[in-house]
Amino acid sequence: MPKILPNSIIFTLCILTTGLWILSKPSLGQIGESPLRSASQLTALIGSVLLSLTLLMSTRIKIIEKLYKGLDKVYQNHHLIGALSFILLIKPPILLALKT
């Protein structure tokens, strides 16, 4: 059985979210026309994904504990990812305020 790195799963989910966000746009020119709005949308989406992952990590599911090889490492990563998601969720209002 191949060894799955939990951080690679998190990175893949963020890349997948970014790809789906890009595909939701009618044209790539729309991203360039309003870069602050686009950045705020993308940071809000990735922040929401990371926040969802922190909630999942706090449930103490045995599979997650095995992936991280210990409950202490799960909560260390929960703390780091939670802080990153908080930062990403604070940025959209700031970016939208800069737009005006």
Image: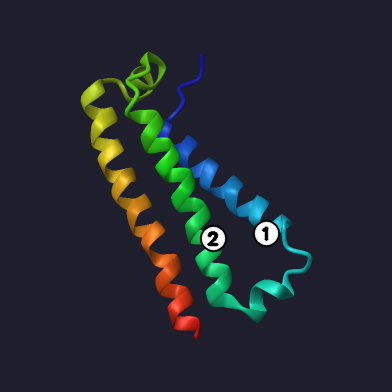
In this picture, residue 39 sits left or right of residue 90:
right
Q: Amino acid at mark 1?
A: Ile
Q: Is residue 39 above or below residue 83?
A: below
Residue 23 image position (x, y, % from top left): 72, 56
Q: Is 56 located above or below residue 48 in the figure?
A: above
Q: What residue appears at the point 73 percent right and 63 percent down from the top-left corner?
A: 25
User: Residue at image x 72%, y 57%?
Assistant: 24
- Look at the picture and state if 53 lies above or below 23: above
- As drawn, is 98 to the left or to the right of 20? left
Q: Marks 2 and 1: CB-CB under 8 Å?
A: no
Label 2 packing within 10 angstroms: few (<14), some (14-19), many (20+): some
Residue matched to label 1: 22
- Residue 54 appears at what percent x and percent y? 37, 37
Q: Helix, strand or loop at disc 1?
A: helix
Q: On the image, numbered disc 2 is attached to which residue?
A: 42
Residue 11 x %, y %? 48, 44
Q: Residue at x 65, y 72 (%)?
A: 31
Residue closest to the eye, 71 or 90: 90
Q: Residues within 10 Å of mark 1 (few under 14, many from 20)?
A: some
Among the 4 quarters of the image, the one containing residue 30: bottom right
Helix, strand or loop status at disc 2? helix
Q: Earlier in the sequence, mark 2 or mark 1?
A: 1
Q: CA distance from mark 2 to mark 1?
A: 9 Å
Please state which amino acid type lies under the numbered disc 2.
Answer: Leu
Residue lying farthest bottom?
100
Q: Is residue 60 left or right of residue 12?
A: left
